[in-house]
Image: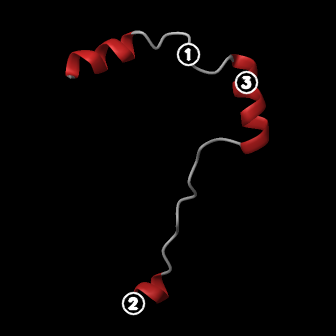
Amino acid sequence: MMDDDIRDVEGAEGKGLSAEEVNKKLQEFGYNEVEEKKSNPVRDF
């Protein structure tokens, strides 16, 4: 089972997005980031 998974990963070369597709998606959706929530000291009290 594990050998099959390793072979799948090793054979995954060239299956990702092209540079053009990456730029298009970055313009459309932006970076994959999560805003850091700031704590409110009054609320924490």
Q: How is the image coloured?
A: secondary structure
- Residue at x 72% of width, y 44% of height: 29
Measured as percent of width and height from the top left, residue 16 is found at 57, 19
| Tag in front: 1 or 2 | 1
Find residue 10 and report its image quarter.
Answer: top left
Which residue is identified by label 2?
Answer: 45
Is disc 3 placed on a helix, strand or loop?
A: helix
Q: Which mark is residue 21?
A: 3
Residue type at tag 2 = Phe
Is disc 2 placed on a helix, strand or loop?
A: loop
Considering depth in this image, is 21 or 6 the residue closer to the camera? Answer: 6
5 lies above or below 41: above
11 lies above or below 33: above
Residue type at tag 1 = Lys
Quadrant for the C terminus, please. bottom left
Quadrant for the N terminus, please. top left
Q: Residues within 10 Å of mark 2 (few under 14, many from 20)?
A: few
Q: Classify residue 18 as left or right of residue 39.
A: right
Considering depth in this image, is 12 or 43 the residue closer to the camera? Answer: 12
Query: Disc 2 versus disc 3: distance between alpha carbons?
Result: 47 Å
- Residue at x 38% of width, y 17% of height: 9
Residue type at tag 3 = Glu
Q: Which mark is residue 15?
A: 1
Pointers 1 and 2 in contact (C-beta within 8 Å): no
**Circle nearer the N terminus (2, 3):** 3
26 lies above or below 39: above
Is disc 1 placed on a helix, strand or loop?
A: loop
Pointers 3 and 1 in contact (C-beta within 8 Å): no
Measured as percent of width and height from the top left, residue 33 is found at 58, 48
